[in-house]
Amino acid sequence: MNYILSKYTFAVSKRTSSGQEICLLFSGRTGKNILVSKKVFSIVENGKFTTLQPKVLEILISEKVLVPSTENELDEINKENKVQLSKKSTDRLYVSIQPTAACQLACDYCGQAHSRKFLTDSLIEQIVCRIKQKISLKDTKSLEIGWFGGEPLMAFSKMKKLNEQLKDIAISRNLKYTGHITTNGYALSPSIYKMLKEDFNVYRIEITLDGSKEFHDKRRVTTSGIGSFDIIFNNLKAITQSPFYDKNTCVISIRCNVDERNIEGVMPLLEMLYKHNMQDKIIFYTTPVVSWSNNGAGSMLGHKLLGKLSSKHIEYMINHNFKVTILPKRVAPYQCIGTDNDAEMYDADGNILDCSETSYSEYYKSKGFVLGNVEQKIIVPNKRSCLHDVPQMLLEKRVYPCNNCKFYPLCGGLCPLGLLEKEPRCPSFIYNIEDRIYLDYLAKIKK
């Protein structure tokens, strides 16, 4: 059989500081990074595969660096994706709850319309009733709650009411009960962290720091225009230094939203986290700012800058013992609330949605993203928005530019909403994959 170099193979050759040439072949089909000799690298680059030693040829074929010349790779990838999607667990119910539309901050790129709305006791009752019904509709074995906002901790009393009832349901039905929360961190005290970990079974808390104070405070200000960095960072320090902080049970994840305005603030933030001995206690990642509710936030310039400069961020994190994801893995089409058959989100008005970006937005309301209201007390099986169709559209090769993209098996299209809006949320690794391949090698030999 004749073989050719896979369209999804990345070949990287770099010299170390000592002058040694490192040759790597990264398979986008399997996510495997392979160190090869200079001779093998040259043979692969020149397409003379028949001259490879049998054992080497076998490895490159098994890792899909080389593929049959007659193979339609996109079709094969989608066949694999279809199998992976069919294995998705159906006994887990995921529900996201927004107990309030209020927020202490007025971030300049946020697409939500904040207001002093909070879940009423009546709506809490209807949400609990709806979740009970959804649990009963299938053989549910686990219930996971995503706490979102607005700023959910501004409605902590509402969260506690919901949690108490949902936890009782889980216990009575022998369900695994877990949660995670997305918060701005402004009200995240050590005592609240402890309650979230121990009472809410929260395993991950995500907060946002948009770079060092100089950069963060220009965009993530309170509603009265005051910078929020100091309070959030001090909360973070107090929690990670407390005797009850446990990253294995409830880890804090720091998200840094990046565009061209704050890209220079990422490295100082990493240095600050290291200075305060947080590098092995938290998870840190960057993500590009994107348009939200058609508000025009984010830019291609910011996206590309993040892609290029994140190589330096990754190198710093490797050298300073942060937990860092360097290379992407092989993935099927991206899964989220919108692509799940049963997952739902409830906002402070009791509206039912299937995307965290579509709440508190007149723009998305007008586009049909509000699926109903919990007060209707009727569950329409599998009522979904257009987001639900995206994985199938990908399998049927109806999504551009994913069909022709070298990174498709590594990103799975990412955000379905972005794909439908023809503004793909492409991962930043598309701009520095060669650096990441080399950094992955360096990280492995460092261990």
Image (cartoon, helix red, strand yellow):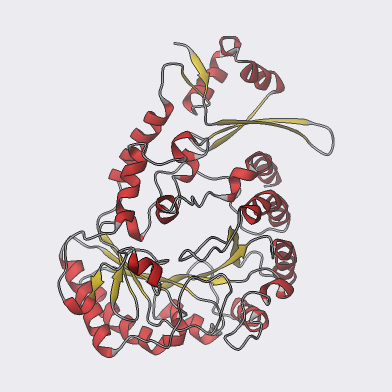
Q: Is residue 358 left or right of residue 287?
A: left
Compared to 434, does 250 lie above or below?
Answer: below
Q: Is residue 25 left or right of residue 401?
A: right
Work out whether residue 72 or residue 223 is closer to the camera in this orientation and state it. Answer: 223
Work out whether residue 328 or residue 368 is closer to the camera in this orientation and state it. Answer: 368
Residue at 20% x, 67% y: name it. Answer: 135
Residue at 52% x, 61% y: name it. Answer: 291
Residue 1 showing in the rendered view: yes
How many circles with numbers are drawn on the protein? 0
Work out whether residue 374 or residue 179 is closer to the camera in this orientation and state it. Answer: 374
Q: In which quarter of the view is residue 124 placed?
A: bottom left
Work out whether residue 330 or residue 238 is closer to the camera in this orientation and state it. Answer: 330
Quadrant in which the N terminus is drawn: top left
Residue 128 showing in the rendered view: no
Residue 101 rendering spot, x and y as whole percentages: 42, 81
Residue 100 rendering spot, x and y as whole percentages: 40, 83
Residue at 59% x, 43% y: name it. Answer: 430
Residue 303 rendering spot, x and y as whole percentages: 62, 53
Q: Is residue 303 left or right of residue 195?
A: right
